[in-house]
Image: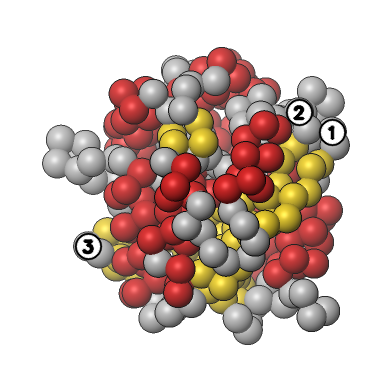
Amino acid sequence: MTAAAAVSRFIDAGGLRTHYLEAGSGAPLVLIHGGGAGADSVGNWKGSMPLLARHFRVIALDMVGFGDTAKPDPAGFDYSQGARVEHLRAFLAALEISRASFIGNSMGGATALGLAADSPARVERLVLMGSAGLNTTIHPGLLPVVNYDFTREGMVRLIRALVNDGFVIDDALVDYRLARSLDPATRAAYGATMKWIRDAGGLAYPPELIARVSCPTLVINGKEDKVVPLANAYRFLELIADSWGWIVPHCGHWAMIEHPDAFARACLAFLRPDA
């Protein structure tokens, strides 16, 4: 199976037309992409989704403001982290999924984390990969993401900030994410999302909220992650009682893109403890 073989669907989630990919069968596994410009379910998960779908009903959504999901006018919509958690909650309700496992990268990790803390009955197992949620300041490595200028050169700088130094950035990756970022509604939503992060001084939850996460949690972090340093991974492990860690060498912020097979297999080993 390829990512193209996944079925593309739309559903109304709390009044927002929401796009998602679905493949496989069995227990539900929800994948949530990161928040960089041009991010969506296809770009983030096409490398690891086929292997995951051999064992789960895999559902990869586009968060509000990204991909093919609705992008409300920022004049009347708050592109906050709380809004993304509520959108995820509405998405699960629309699909009548009462409980699932989740894999979230970066902003997607923070979104799954917020759900796990507020609604523990909804989350079976949780994988946080280069997750936001502890970024109390805007790390210098994040500046090409927060200050993305919607040029091809800016997209190259953004991708370079998110991958390990040895990763070869091909034209197809740059062109895909650049094209996804330039739609006017997407651009406005991204600008509002990054403004919220700048105004908040980062994307962080109070430590006591993170400590409320009670489900088994796997914390994955690249050794070369310039956006989420290793110290954040260890802090998640300290705060979440039932947690394990996997630190990936020669890896930046995008384990699912830089090392898709190894990433998927590590997730499966954690998500299927009886296998």
Q: Which mark is residue 250?
A: 1
Element type at marker 3? loop
Q: Residue at x 36, y 38 (%)?
A: 186
On the image, numbered disc 2 is attached to which residue?
224
List x then y, in percent, for residue 23: 61, 73
Q: Are marks 2 and 1 in contact (CB under 8 Å)?
A: yes
Using a 10 Å C-alpha cutoff, classify the residue at mark 2 as few (fewer than 14 neighbours), some (14 to 19) or many (20 or more). many
On the image, numbered disc 3 is attached to which residue?
15
Using a 10 Å C-alpha cutoff, classify the residue at mark 1 as few (fewer than 14 neighbours), some (14 to 19) or many (20 or more). some
Residue extending farthest left? 76
Q: Is residue 76 above or below residue 161?
A: below
Q: Residue at x 78, y 49 (%)?
A: 246
Q: Disc 1 residue type?
A: His
| Quadrant position of residue 202 | top left
Quarter the C terminus occupies: bottom right
Quarter the N terminus occupies: bottom right
Q: Residue at x 43, y 50 (%)?
A: 209
Q: Disc 2 residue type?
A: Glu
Q: Is residue 26 above or below residue 59?
A: below
Q: Is residue 31 above or below residue 238?
A: below
Q: Is residue 20 above or below residue 229?
A: below
How much space separates mark 2 and mark 1, taking CA atoms?
Answer: 6 Å
Q: Disc 3 residue type?
A: Gly
How much space separates mark 3 and mark 1, taking CA atoms?
Answer: 41 Å
Q: In front: mark 3 or mark 2?
A: 2
List x then y, in percent, for residue 7: 55, 70
Q: Are marks 3 and 2 in contact (CB under 8 Å)?
A: no
Using a 10 Å C-alpha cutoff, classify the residue at mark 3 as few (fewer than 14 neighbours), some (14 to 19) or many (20 or more). few
Task: Indicate the colouring scheme.
Answer: secondary structure
**Depth check: 117 or 253 in front?**
117
- Lower sequence index among marks 3 and 1: 3
